[in-house]
Amino acid sequence: MTLNLSLLVALMLLMTAGCVISITARSLTSSVVSMGTAGLILSILFLLLGAPDIAIVQVFVEIVSLIVLLSTIRR
């Protein structure tokens, strides 16, 4: 199975954009959501590169961290 290099580059650019938006966002909620988006794209990259176990752990960590951060923001 050969991966398309342009797909990997596009996913990495989307992940980088999510990180930049996370840093520069004015509201905490949009910052957390964009951080979660970057983490989700990272797990997709892990899956495409042949590391499904790391992708599953990444998704679990992202879900737990988003729940904790969003519940902290609401308080």
Image: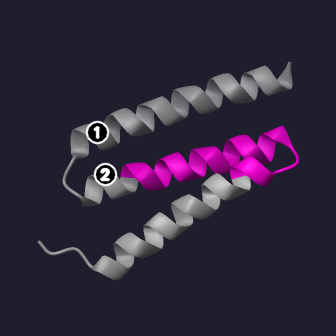
Which quadrant of the figure has residue 56? top left
Q: Of the two numbered discs 2 and 1 on the same chain, state the one appearing first in sequence.
A: 2
Residue 12 image offset from top left, x and y in percent: 46, 65
* Residue beneath disc 1: 54
Name the residue rendered at 65%, 22% in the picture: 68
Which sits in the foreground, 27 or 60? 27
Q: Quadrant of the N terminus?
A: bottom left
The residues colored magenta run 22-43
Q: Is residue 45 above or below residue 4?
A: above
Q: Amino acid at mark 1?
A: Ile
Q: Are marks 2 and 1 in contact (CB under 8 Å)?
A: yes
Residue 72 image offset from top left, x and y in percent: 77, 21
User: Tag 2: Cα neighbours inside 10 Å, few (<14), some, or many (≥20)?
Assistant: some
Residue 23 lies in the magenta-colored region: yes
Residue 70 lies in the magenta-colored region: no
Name the residue rendered at 41%, 73% in the picture: 9
Name the residue rendered at 74%, 45% in the picture: 31
Identify the secondary structure beneath mark 1. Answer: helix
Name the residue rendered at 23%, 58% in the picture: 49
Furthest-left residue in view? 1
Identify the secondary structure beneath mark 2. Answer: helix
Q: Is residue 16 above or below residue 64?
A: below
Chief secondary structure of the magenta portion:
helix
Q: Amino acid at mark 2?
A: Phe
User: Tag 1: Cα neighbours inside 10 Å, few (<14), some, or many (≥20)?
Assistant: few
Whole-Å distance between the Cαs marked 2 and 1? 7 Å
* Residue beneath disc 2: 46
Q: Quadrant of the C terminus?
A: top right
